[in-house]
Structures are given as structure tokens and as C-alpha cells.
Amino acid sequence: MEGALLSVENVSVYYHTPQGETEAVRDLSFSVGKGEFVAVVGPSGCGKTTVLSLIMGLHPPSLGEVRFPQGPCPMGYMLQRDNLLEWRTLEKNAVLGLEVRHKLNNATRERTVALLEKYGLGDFLFHYPSQLSGGMRQKAALIRTLALNPELLLLDEPFSALDYQTRLTLADEVFSIIHGEGKTALLVTHDIGEAVSMADRVLVFTDRPATLRREIALNFPKGMTPLQRREEPAFQEYFAAIWKELGR
Ligand code: ADP
Ligand code: MG
């Protein structure tokens, strides 16, 4: 792809365990362009998290290559669990990544607090995680990642531990944060609705070993929020098309 930030090229992954060899990913290729929001949908256990850990460089592919054609790409991630530290206030949690990397100074602290304020957490700076709702905690985890100013955000089922209402509202907020901050995003999920409501493009993975079954570009009017997309007739059509691919 022209201008790709990330390019996964003919990647296969084998896990070796005492029980034998597991093929988790097979000959997978895709790319993500700068500023794009790409969702990966696949059944649980198909190899989605494995693909994200390859991109993060946590382990190398067995075959093929993960490339960053425009050079090293700072990455941040948002996971199902927020991993906030219960004994630190929201503000202190949000600057944790900066602190660990020795990048915490007045400017980076102010920038992080400004993000918390901009996205509705300004009244909770001195609250502890246990005093926040699940949705607020996840949003705080995202802002902690944004504090490090990543270019590419990797989201691994970030809403799946939340109740349905919270999931829908938070998807809207996360969508607006990612667009507002001009980030590129790769979301992996087993939830078709989540993918269709948020992404520009959906990659449908097969069962394990994960490989690309189909790629679907979503054409919703620009600026339409996830909740608004859910009201569109096209939402049902995309949903049905992906459902059919997964069911085969
Ligand atoms: P998903 O995120 O789509 O649910 P994963 O990438 O976590 O799937 O896992 C894909 C497959 O690889 C599963 O069968 C899982 O049991 C296996 N697997 C994942 N991580 C490891 C590992 N570190 N060692 C051995 N097998 C693993
Ligand atoms: Mg997973």
C-alpha cells in the first residue's frame, strides 16, 4: 500500500509447546495506512492477539516480515484490562508511562492533564481507580497511552469486559479521541458491530490459523459517530456480510 505505516507480509507463526506445535497464523498479509482505522474481526482463539504481539515486537514471526515502511513507529496499546494501579490517583496513573520512561516533566504532565480534561475526566484527577466506572477506567488507560504520543494505537478487545451500554458509549468516545488526536488505529475484536461501527476497513480473519478471509471497506459518511452508524441501513448490510464470512 502506498504510504503504509505498517505492513504485515506473508507472516506465519508457530507456537512450540510441550504438547506439540500450534500454527497460530498462516501466510497473513495486510497493511495499515497513516491515519486509517482498521478493524480485525475473527473468532476467539483464531490468532488476533498473536498478530498484535508480532506488531509490538514481543515475538518475531516464524516466517515472513512485519515492516514499518515509513520508519520506526511509536506504538501504544489499549487492552481488555485497564491495568490501572489501584493505589495511584487517576492523574498519577495517567503519567505512569511517562514516569517509567523518564519523560515526565511539567510540559508532559500538563499535556496529559489537558487530555484528561478534554475528554471528560478533569473532575476525577484525584480519584482512585476504584472510584471510577469501568468505562472511565478504560478511557483513562487510553489517555495514559496517548500521553506518550504514539502514532499507532493497537486495541485488543478493549471493550469486551464492559456491559453493553458502556461499550456503546465508550466506543463513541474512543472513536472521537482517536480521530481528535489524529492517530492511526488497529482494533482487534470478535464483535462484528464494534468493528463496523468504528473502522474505515475491516479485515475478516479465518479460524486458527489466522489468515485473511476477506477485506471490506466501509463507506459511511465522514464524521459519522459509531452510534450514528448503528442507525444506518448500511450497518446491517456490512454486519450481515461479515457474519456470513465468519460462519463459513
Ligand atoms: P485470539 O486473540 O484471536 O483469541 P490468540 O492469538 O490469543 O487468539 O491465540 C491463538 C492460538 O494460539 C490459540 O490457540 C492459543 O491457545 C495459542 N497461543 C497463544 N499464545 C500462545 C503461547 N504463548 N504459546 C502457545 N500457544 C499460544
Ligand atoms: Mg485475544
Image (tube, rainbow, N blue to C red):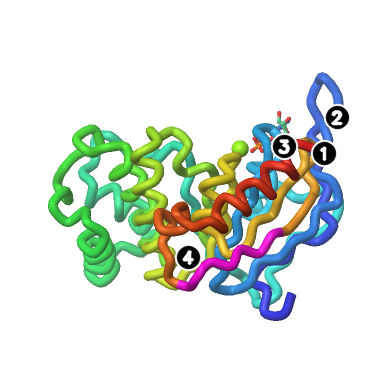
Residue that label 1 marks = 14
Residue 84 at what x, y percent from top left?
34, 40
Residue 62 at what x, y percent from top left?
83, 47
Badges 3 and 2: C-beta atoms under 8 Å apart?
A: no
65 left or right of 154 in image: right
Residue 100 shows in the view: no
* Quadrant housing the C terminus: top right
Who is closer to the viewer here, 78 or 206? Answer: 206
Q: Name which quarter of the figure residue 130 lies in.
A: top left
Q: If you read the primary sequence from the N terminus, does the residue marked by circle 4 or circle 2 appear first? A: 2
Mark 3 lies within 8 Å of ligand 1 (Cβ measured)? yes
Residue 25 shows in the view: yes
Q: Residue at x 44, y 54 (%)?
A: 231
Disc 3 or disc 2, which is closer to the eye?
A: 3
Residue that label 3 marks = 46
Residue that label 2 marks = 21
28 left or right of 117 in image: right
Residue that label 4 marks = 150
